[in-house]
Amino acid sequence: MSSEFLLGDCHTHLDQYPSAEMSEILDRARESGVAFAVCAGTTLRSTQDCINLAEQHEPLYAGVGIHPMEANEPVTEDIYAELERMAKSSSKVVCISEVGLDYLPASPNHDTQDQVFRQHIRLARSLNLPIIFHSRESHPEVFKVLREESAGDVGGAMHYFQGDEATAREAIDCGFYISLARPLTRLPELQEVAKVIPLENIVLETDAAPQPFKKYRTNWTEPRHVQSVAQTLAEIKGIPVEEVARVTTGNLARLLRLERLTNAG
């Protein structure tokens, strides 16, 4: 399939791939119908790399943010100013990402994560940018912060969603989309959730990043794999993949104010 329909990838870490591979990765994405993809920052350095990548490649856009697993210190006035400077530095910046909370045992101090997440939400609201957030073992705390900080004013998406139906509906109630990735193709319980969540509340992603633990390079996740997520969602819902692409890409394009890239405005 070249581009019988258009897809968007809500969340990638393409800055982690060798720059020499980028043209081929984007060629494969284009052949799979991917019109645009967001490269999410995880540190200040990574954020700048994402912006640089987006400036160099037309289909790529950037997110500004410090990942919760990198939240080893509070966001000071200087760090906030640098995040704000980067967010304002390019028209290719379309969201605040990747931010959130992660309560895995080895994660940074929870109070520090909380402060960092709240500062990013305040930045997002001040710049009117949507928030693509990460939540792992922390859903109740994430939703508490989102509500307290009025994050729904700018909205966004719950990245790499793997939760239950109640979690999905709470995210939607907070003003956020559910972002589905490749786990949808292999987790029956997630497929059951996707079946009952309206297409109007869903966007798609890959979370593409190098995966050297996989035996073959061809199996590393890339933006092109968003096509298989769309195909699986279509099968689950019993509707044409073209309809899945039209609605989910339209959702993402409107969220990121990229309607000009699609016919779904």
Image (spheres, rainbow, N blue to C red):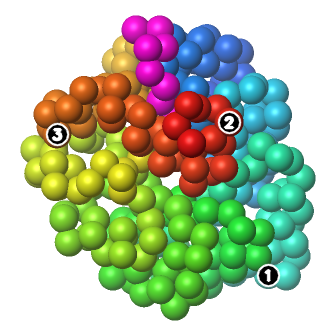
Left or right: 20, with 228 as reference point: right
Residue 151 vs 54, above or below: the answer is below
Which image quarter holds the C terminus?
Answer: top right
Mark 2 or mark 1: whose residue is earlier in sequence: 1
Q: Amino acid at mark 2?
A: Arg
Dot 2 crowding, Cα within 10 Å, few <14, some 14–19, many 20+: few
Kind of element beneath mark 3: helix
Q: Which residue is mark 3?
A: 237
Dot 1 crowding, Cα within 10 Å, few <14, some 14–19, many 20+: few
The residue under the point 54% across, 67% down is 155
Majority secondary structure of magenta residues: loop
Which image quarter: residue 27?
top right
Dot in front, 2 or 1? 2
Query: x%, y% of residue 232?
Result: 22, 31
Residue 248 vs 169, above or below: the answer is above
The residue under the point 36% across, 75% down is 173
Query: x%, y% of residue 177?
Result: 42, 59
Q: Which residue is mark 2?
A: 260
The residue under the point 61% across, 18% down is 26
Residue 23 vs 74, above or below: the answer is above
Q: Is residue 262 visible?
A: yes
Q: Amino acid at mark 1?
A: Thr
Q: Which residues are magenta?
A: 1-10
Left or right: 82, with 49 as reference point: right
Q: Amino acid at mark 3?
A: Lys
